[in-house]
Image: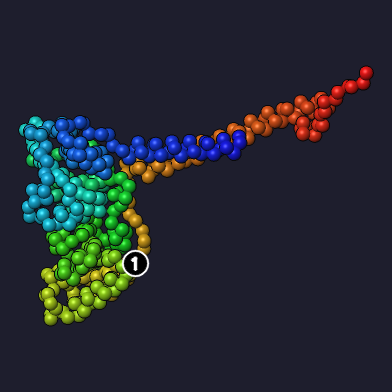
Amino acid sequence: MSIHSFHRLIACAALAFAAASGAQQKPAAPAASPASAASQKSASQKAAATPAALRADKPLLPDSFAGWVTKDAPKAIGDASQADAQNTAALKEYGYQAGATATYQREGETLTVRALRFNDLSGAYGAYSFYRGTGWPKEDIGNGAASNKNRVIFWRGLIVVDANFSRIGSMSGSELRELSSQLPEAQGTKALAPPILSILPKKWLDAQSTHYALGPAGYVGSGGVLPPDLVGFDRDAEAVTANYSLTSGPAVLTLVEYPTPQMAAAFETKIRDYIKSAAKASPPFPKPMQDSDQASLEVRRTGPVVALVSGDAIPDESHKLLASVYYREDYVSVPQPTESEVSKTSKLLVGIASLVLLGAATAIFLGVFFGGARAMYRISRGKPVSSVYEAEFIRLDLRE
């Protein structure tokens, strides 16, 4: 294979990759409407920017599943205040996009379902941890689930589902798993869980007690320990709280991550001074801090993360728990049952590379095979291996 042929093969492979990538990223065009050309162009751009599985015109909830059938068609919810009037601010902090409600019936029983969609997996997980009560039994549904009597909350990808059964049954979990399988999974960077979760120590951690907050409403609503103004949510801080069962008593660990270590150092000083002020603190200690052993309250910083321990454990054990916190630049991803776009792209690149290598190997093999056969044929006739070594002249006999 010549150099030019090899370059042409590379160019064709690149064009194939570009075409395949464009086909994967460009969703199907919406049906034509009598709108103006400008409106059609705007709608087309909006559709191209939103994955097909997550568009607003795609229902979040199906009309039926596992024998459950809706009494009326699922009702779309636009504004966060319609989704949950009491927790509107928290939903907005978590990046609420849209929602839907539906009431299903089956053999005289009812199932009320509310689905909420968020900007990314971090927001969906935060909203799930906000609604899930601490210590609720864990269920195997979607990316995570918990139940409380007839109520089951689970999340999958960008969607949180709150289901209430009129009567819970042995197959209720299986039925919700079927519903979960019809919900879209998060893809690409939207599938990254909050990195701060990887910093939580696993030892002594109480299951189903983690709460993740992106703003003051979500933090207070999920039982935050510090005054929200002291956390620094206006500086893009993220907070997570979790309960730990230590030998001497329960403890609560609060982690707050800031954009930079310098910002974290400044807030560490503020929080430490606030703890030292005790009875003179302004604002006064929230109830979780008032109920804590004041000698066990301790704060430290690791990288851009500030950690605070509170609760009733003795100071030595609280200090050990706090000392086990260390910052590392890890990214937590939730296992995806479907193939991600990154995986598809990597497989395409591997396929292109394999095609190029196969073509090169085939060219080398054919060159050796045919060239070697010709060389053997010339040697058998007593000639040099290559015709390059033969000096062939045309002789003209001009003698009379």
* Quadrant containing the N terminus in the rendered view: top right
Q: Is residue 180 shown above or below 382?
A: below
The colour scheme used to paint the residues is: rainbow
- Location of mark 1 (residue): 326
Q: Which residue occupies the foreground of this view, 151 or 183?
A: 183
Q: Amino acid at mark 1?
A: Tyr
Q: Is residue 58 shown above or below 148?
A: above
- Residue 331 point in image, percent of width and height: 34, 56
- Residue 156 point in image, percent of width and height: 24, 45
Residue occupying the point 22% across, 34% down: 30
Q: Is residue 239 shown above or below 112?
A: below
- Residue 114 point in image, percent of width and height: 13, 44
Residue occupying the point 19% across, 46% down: 117
Residue occupying the point 80% across, 26% down: 380
- Regarding residue 26, the answer to whether it shows in the image is yes
- Regarding residue 245, the answer to whether it shows in the image is no
Q: Which residue occupies the foreground of this view, 48 or 188?
A: 48
Quarter-of-image position of residue 170: top left
Residue occupying the point 45% across, 41% down: 349
Residue 70 as seen in the image, left or right of residue 328: left
Q: Is residue 32 shown above or below 48?
A: above
Q: Which residue occupies the foreground of this view, 188 or 359?
A: 359
Q: Residue furthest top?
A: 400
